[in-house]
Amino acid sequence: MAEKKLSKKALNKSFRNWYYGNLTCFSQEHMQTFGYLCAMLPLVEELYDTKEEQKEAMNTYTAFFNTEPQVGAVIVGITAGLEEAKANGNDDVDAETINGIRAGLMGPIAGIGDSLVVGTLIPILLGIALGLSTGGSVVGPIFYIIAWNLIVTLGMKFLYTKGYELGGKAVDVLVGERATAIRESIVMLGTMVVGSVASTWVSVTTSFHLVNDAGEEFLNLQKQLDSVYPGCLTAAFVIFCWWLMAKKRVSPVVTMLILVVIAFVGVLVGFFNPGLKY
């Protein structure tokens, strides 16, 4: 019997299904399960001839699945290679093996993906886009839309293809000590990027000052703070927002409302000047 080999057409269709539909029928119960099923359907239809075989193969992917969808394309590629090996009668690959690998990769890939995409790539692109948007220019949003879609599309396609080529061998790279080191490095880089973006685009200053009876200023709080730690109010507000959202699990909307209240009270007591940006 001739060896079964997935065609480029089937692989491309599988990738497109994941690219556009990874959050298909998303729910708290299933998360990305149905998106995964959509991605595997064209592969299973090409590898297996009978409806019974196809049904049995698709049943493998009904288990719960959730990870970072962009970097997670590598898992779909890996299982495509494993499903091809299974269809060719490889005794080392069965439904339990495939599901075990999927479950084992979900967490590490989510950690790497969230750090790389959400914590690093998006802040960098937004920082550049904000700079290009100065004065209301439309170049900033156009840049972000083009750059994001180009990077994500090419990146996901590369990861899917490499995952398919490596198959089960990719597990050695994506889990264990090496994966932990990669994730920690990306987290560190992402933290530095977020800090740089915050220092560039966030500015919190105070207008609080004291004058003597002669009307001469003898205390300017902002100048005093800058002489000790320039930008300390900005850093304090950024850390405060991080503490609310990361430690107290306060939503971004509620956090913004808290900042509005702080700004309103600050203006009333003279700590903030309504004519300044803060």
Image (cartoon, rainbow, N blue to C red):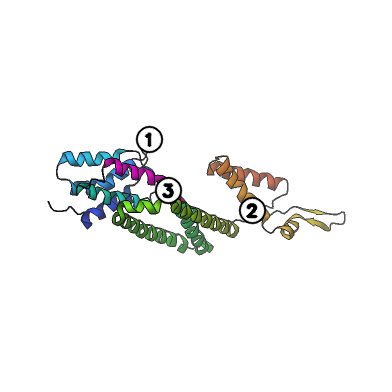
Q: Secondary structure at mark 2?
A: helix
Q: Nearer the viewer, residue 84 or 211?
A: 84
Specify whether residue 108 is painted magenta: yes
| Residue 276 in view (yes/no) | yes
Q: CA distance from mark 1 to mark 2?
A: 39 Å
The image quarter in which residue 12 lies:
bottom left
Q: Position of residue 179 (x, y in %)?
A: 44, 52
Label located before the other in sequence (1 or 2): 1
Query: Do the residues under discs 3 and 2 have CB atoms within 8 angstroms?
Result: no
Q: Position of residue 183 (x, y in %)?
A: 47, 53
What is the number of callouts on the image?
3
At x 60% / y 58%, what residue is drawn? 199
Whether residue 32 sits left or right of residue 86 in the image: it is right
The image quarter in which residue 243 lies:
top right
Residue under label 3: 108
What crowding class fits label 2: few (fewer than 14 Cα within 10 Å), some (14-19), or many (20 or more)? Answer: some
Label located before the other in sequence (3 or 1): 1
At x 30% / y 38%, what residue is drawn? 62
Label located before the other in sequence (3 or 2): 3
Residue under label 1: 29
Which amino acid lies under the numbered mark 1 shown in the image of this protein?
Glu
Which amino acid lies under the numbered mark 2 shown in the image of this protein?
Ala
Q: Which residues are magenta?
A: 92-115
60 relative to 143, above or below: above
Which amino acid lies under the numbered mark 3 shown in the image of this protein?
Pro
Q: Secondary structure at mark 3?
A: helix
Extreme residue toward the top, this view: 29
What crowding class fits label 3: few (fewer than 14 Cα within 10 Å), some (14-19), or many (20 or more)? Answer: many
Circle on res. 235: 2
Q: Position of residue 174 (x, y in %)?
A: 40, 52
Specify whether residue 19 is painted magenta: no
Q: Position of residue 246 (x, y in %)?
A: 55, 44
